Image (cartoon, grey):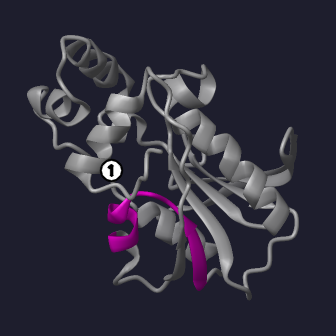
Amino acid sequence: MSLKAQAASIIPMEQGVFKMIAYSDDPEDMSPHFAIVGEHFDPFQPVLVRVHSECITGDLFGSHRCDCGEQLEKSLELISKEGGVLIYLRQEGRGIGIINKLKAYNIQDQGVNTVDANTHLGFEADERTYETAIEILQDLGIKKIRLLTNNPSKLTAFEHSDVEVIERLPLEITPRKENRYYLETKKSLMGHLLKLS
């Protein structure tokens, strides 16, 4: 069975009213991916899109170790205004899962950067993939997008797909003392397009 929309409902949030669509290849999946669709969504126009990978610590608990939660909130605000779409992918910790992410945090607390912490545990610096996001966007009938991202890997993922990125829009969050080194590492070692002012 291939990935498909299993259920959908209207969800009022602080940032606006959205349609939440759960995607999975299994109707009983306890952790499906989501498309969060803004009220004024029009697939025939270039759509503002954020592809956001799950971050339990940042998205749910407001951790300051990363900028994920703040990126999620800002994305929802913009998507609400423009009728865009947020794709929420269940690939926690850059694809290594929450348990290994917490282990990586302990390694980082010894002075190791986020990239080397992941490789120390036997993973790539970033284990995420974006084919699922492209599949969901195609299911929504989207052909052209304006992508909210600082990550060049996301741009690369769309290069040979049927979804065209016509514009990249930055999604920078003001660094905090707790996450500045993390963000500097993403810029210097992972090529993220950040100013870090």
Q: Is residue 134 magenta?
A: no
| Left or right: where 129 falls relative to 175 | left
Q: Nearer the viewer, residue 8 or 108?
A: 108
Q: Quadrant of residue 98?
A: top left
| Left or right: where 41 falls relative to 35 | right
Residue 162 lies, in percent from the top left, at 46, 86
Compared to residue 55, the image places residue 143 above or below, namely below
Q: Which residue is mark 1?
A: 128
Q: Nearer the viewer, residue 145 or 100?
A: 145
Q: Nearer the viewer, residue 27 or 99?
A: 99
Evaluate whether residue 171 shows in this view: yes
Q: Quadrant of residue 42?
A: bottom right
Q: Residue at x 28, y 23 (%)?
A: 100
Mark 1: amino acid: Arg
Evaluate whether residue 1 shows in this view: no
Compared to residue 157, the image places residue 54 above or below, namely above
Q: Is residue 147 magenta?
A: yes
Residue closest to the far front: 197
Q: How many marks?
A: 1
Compared to residue 189, the image places residue 102 above or below, namely above
Q: Quadrant of residue 66?
A: top left
Q: Residue at x 87, y 70 (%)?
A: 40
Q: Residue at x 44, y 45 (%)?
A: 196
Residue 128 lies, in percent from the top left, at 33, 50
Q: Residues within 10 Å of mark 1 (few under 14, many from 20)?
A: some
| Left or right: where 102 falls relative to 190 | right
The magenta span reads 143-156
Q: Residue at x 50, y 82 (%)?
A: 163
Residue 47 lies, in percent from the top left, at 68, 76
**Label 1 secondary element:** loop
Residue 179 lies, in percent from the top left, at 42, 27
